[in-house]
Image: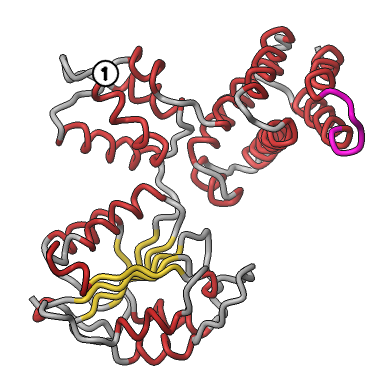
Amino acid sequence: MVANLKLIWRGEQVNYYEISDQVKNRNLKSLYLITGKQEYLIDQLKNQFINVIPKDERTMNFASYDMETTPLDDAMNDAMSAPFFGEHRLVIINNPLFLTGEKSKNKIDHDIDSLLKYIQKPMPSTILVIIAPYEKLDARKKIVKQLKKAAVQVDLQSVNEFETKQYVNTFLNQHGYQIDSRVMDQLIQRTDGQLSAIMSDLPKVMIYCHQDKQITTNAVNSLVTKTLNQNIFTLVDMVLRKQTTYAVSLYQELIMEGQSSIQINAVLLGQFRLLLQVLVLSKYGYSQGKLASALKVHPFRVKLAMQTIRKYHFTELKRAFLGLSDIEKQLKSTNESPELLFEMFMLKFA
């Protein structure tokens, strides 16, 4: 009901579960700001907001606008309109790059003042949801400052390993499935701890395990796609173990799967850079959480890096990093076969 729409004059921060409960219970606010790159959770929240509007009213009372292709004015005009034979109007603004320090390639003139004015006096019957799928907003901008003061803020920037496991366990339990800790760890490892990647493949795993309703290691290994980062982590391990044949074989497999040699080498180089950074910073007392925050990487990647650096010396990691840096230069300046360059690197390193 309209009475449940409470005008916000002071920003508040909530987590995914809190906002999900608010929407399901129709304890709705006028303005929401959702940030971060957790695509799966963003889509879940978006669908929950859409479900607030009855199906037979959505044609007239729901609209979603992409700021990469549509002027802000169109969305604001819609937000300021009364609902048509309904109680609520839902307006979703997607990809508001103007909230960041980046410049859009599409030359669309956005009237930011119209949004500033709306924030001061929102339409009581409208639910305005702004979805900014970015790592950070430009806090210096007036519009960002005003939004943070007025909107309910949901930060979906990163989900740690504990939260990921909690979400997956809850989802499986709701559907009558079980998963033990060993299989869960395998699932986390194959997906590099990325919730969106897990939830993309989980339906296939559930169908595979439908009879016993118990998620198995075999199902995870057979159906869950390894992320490029996870394949690279395996490749890093092979390099450090000096397993030349296996390393070259996996490198060739990644090429055959459509990964570019420059991208593979860049991710591989980045992984060795991370190992060196974790090795150095951990000696200064940085914890796993503090490392993830300082280096701006997923906590699970830091966890794996910390396990790796216990087994190898700084000198070995540095040699590998410099060798891969040399490959990067040659990939950009010569016509040498990428596979041959990598094989030569492995032979020299080993």
Q: Is residue 160 left or right of residue 6?
A: right
* Residue 190 on image: x %, y %: 46, 25
Residue 198's quadrant in the figure? top left
* Residue 223 on image: x %, y %: 38, 21
112 falls in the magenta region: no
The magenta-colored residue range is 331-337
Amino acid type, label 1: Tyr
Check disc 1 and report the residue beneath it: 208
112 lies above or below 29? below
Which residue occupies 33% across, 53% down?
43
335 falls in the magenta region: yes
Quadrant of the drawing holding the N terminus:
bottom left
Residue 288 visible, this orientation? yes
Residue 12 visible, this orientation? no
Q: Secondary structure at mark 1?
A: helix
* Residue 261 on image: x %, y %: 73, 30
**Mark 1 closeness class: few <14, some 14–19, many ≥20 residues within 10 Å:** some
